Image (spheres, rainbow, N blue to C red):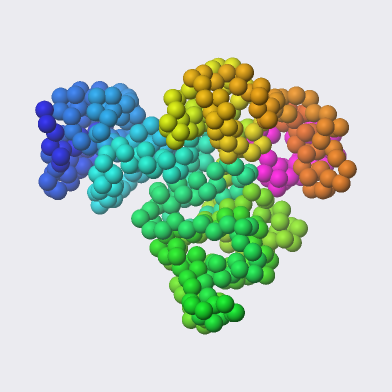
């Protein structure tokens, strides 16, 4: 049977919601069918393959993910939009990674659904999901990652400023893009500026722009990043590297929601949402006087974090497979098989460079060993030897204590290794170090150590 291009299958176990959706679709000229559960939905789809399925995630006889898998087995081009309550955001994110085109949080308006359908159809069905995932690449199924993505999805529904604190290489910019792509600003610009990469004397002009004649060489007016992000999202990457003299100006912009170009007295309204990232603890910088406390609290409206790779080892095989397929596609080579021994060695490594280090390692291995199977022999010739994580062996002070080591680094390593020695027992660690449990807790937060690991 040839599907009507305006045909849709609505799946929801709540009769009221199902009837409302059907009525709205029919009012807008759609040929509509409906199902009250997963089993009925699969049967009806097999009878009449429609180009669009709108399905709830949680239902008594199954879930929207199983419906989506069944739909895509017989019709890969069919677009699937998920309807989800707040508690099932992780499942929705997982479904997006596996082929869903979009998801909507309940309650939602039909206008929001229509907008989602427009984006889906403009992206030719499932293709849009692949393109979206290609940009964000938030890959994994671990509880730690899904919890972070769930908080990011909640933040995306607001216009509040966001601060993302996480180690280098964990994907802070990807999470910022995820927030942008799942917000009402998704059709507007996403503009990023690395506060550590721009020279101090140029950063103010880079952010705020400048008027003609503002300084030597300013032969024409120039819009800054705040203006270029108008209506969209501005990412202040590595905001902790922002020079102290410039921090009061950023604070004023965030408070007054307006700024002035360098050399101009005419205010420009700030119409961008601010997302800031840092790989160091801003709270610790505030305590040391390297970062303004008022700016920290103004940025930290919605605090988010990403787990380091060693805290979500179950995602390493998924990431390695994802990168292998991605690299193979880019280099026109067959997708290799990762042997269990190879994966086990990957999981045993601490990956201090996190996901970025794993990506670069996989790229190197596939480039130098273009074989159909990747095994432990491929690792023996590499400059990086995948040694077991230091968390799995007894630490030896002589392997990490170095003359001239900064006191802050020494304190962090001493704290982390004491907690490892006590299997995360904070009370025992506090006794060994001669400090209070509260101080242990504060130091864990200050140094960004994984709190659940040291519960």
Q: Quadrant of the N terminus?
A: top left
Residue name at image x 15 percent, y 24 percent:
47
427 drawn magenta: yes
Q: Does residue 69 appear to the left or right of 420 in the view shown?
A: left
Across and down, in percent, residue 111 comes to: 25, 52
Q: Does residue 205 appear to the left or right of 79 in the view shown?
A: right
Residue 418 to residue 228: above or below: above
Q: Does residue 27 appear to the left or right of 429 in the view shown?
A: left
220 drawn magenta: no
Residue name at image x 62 percent, y 18 percent:
377
Residue name at image x 54 percent, y 30 percent:
367
Residue 79 to residue 374: above or below: below
Q: Does residue 116 appear to the left or right of 158 in the view shown?
A: left
Across and down, in percent, residue 312 comes to: 58, 31
Rendering quarter of residue 98: top left
Judge by depth and name the residue closer to the eye, 455 or 235: 235
Judge by depth and name the residue closer to the eye, 253 or 2: 2
Q: Quadrant of the C terminus?
A: top right
Judge by depth and name the residue closer to the eye, 146 or 234: 234
Across and down, in percent, residue 107 comes to: 32, 46
Residue 446 to residue 5: above or below: below
Residue name at image x 44 percent, y 25 percent:
334
Q: Please give the count of numbered marks on the rendered protein.
A: 0
Judge by depth and name the residue closer to the eye, 249 or 90: 249
Rendering quarter of residue 20: top left
Prevailing SS of the magenta stretch: helix
Across and down, in percent, residue 299 comes to: 57, 59
Q: Which residues are magenta?
A: 426-455
């Amino acid at each position: 049977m040839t599907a009507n291009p305006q045909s849709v299958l609505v799946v929801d176990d709540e009769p009221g919601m199902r009837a409302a959706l059907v009525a709205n679709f029919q009012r807008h000229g759609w040929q509509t069918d409906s199902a009250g559960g997963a089993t009925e939905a699969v049967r009806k789809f097999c009878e009449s393959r429609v180009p669009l399925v709108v399905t709830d995630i949680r239902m008594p006889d199954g879930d929207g993910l199983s419906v989506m898998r069944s739909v895509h087995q017989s019709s890969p081009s069919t677009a699937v939009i998920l309807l989800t309550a707040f508690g099932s955001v992780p499942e929705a994110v997982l479904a997006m990674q596996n082929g869903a085109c979009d998801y909507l949080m309940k309650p939602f308006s039909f206008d929001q659904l229509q907008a989602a359908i427009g984006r889906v159809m403009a992206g030719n069905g499932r293709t849009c999901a692949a393109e979206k995932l290609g940009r964000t690449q938030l890959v994994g199924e671990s509880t730690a990652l899904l919890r972070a993505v769930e908080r990011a999805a909640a933040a995306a529904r607001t216009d509040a400023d966001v601060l993302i604190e996480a180690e280098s290489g964990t994907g802070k910019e990807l999470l910022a893009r995820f927030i942008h792509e799942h917000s009402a600003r998704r059709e507007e610009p996403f503009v990023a500026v690395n506060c550590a990469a721009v020279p101090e004397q140029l950063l103010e002009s880079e952010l705020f722009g400048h008027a003609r004649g503002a300084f030597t060489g300013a032969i024409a007016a120039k819009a800054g990043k705040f203006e270029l992000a108008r209506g969209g999202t501005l990412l202040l990457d590595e905001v902790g590297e922002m020079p102290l003299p410039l921090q009061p100006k950023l604070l004023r912009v965030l408070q007054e929601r307006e700024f002035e170009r360098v050399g101009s007295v005419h205010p420009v309204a700030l119409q961008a949402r601010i997302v800031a990232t840092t790989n160091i603890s801003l709270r610790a910088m505030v305590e040391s006087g390297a970062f303004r406390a008022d700016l920290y609290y103004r940025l930290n409206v919605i605090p988010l974090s990403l787990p380091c790779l060693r805290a979500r080892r179950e995602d390493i095989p998924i990431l390695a497979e994802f990168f292998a397929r991605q690299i193979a596609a880019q280099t026109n080579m067959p997708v290799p098989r990762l042997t269990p021994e190879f994966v086990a060695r990957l999981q045993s490594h601490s990956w201090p460079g996190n996901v970025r280090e794993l990506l670069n390692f996989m790229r190197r291995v596939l480039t130098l060993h273009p074989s159909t199977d990747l095994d432990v022999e491929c690792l023996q010739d590499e400059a990086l030897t995948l040694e077991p994580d230091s968390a799995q062996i007894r630490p030896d002070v002589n392997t990490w204590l170095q003359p001239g080591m900064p006191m802050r680094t020494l304190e962090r390593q001493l704290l982390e290794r004491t907690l490892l020695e006590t299997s995360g027992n904070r009370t025992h660690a506090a006794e060994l170090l001669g400090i209070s449990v509260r101080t242990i807790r504060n130091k864990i937060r200050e140094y960004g150590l994984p709190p659940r690991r040291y519960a």
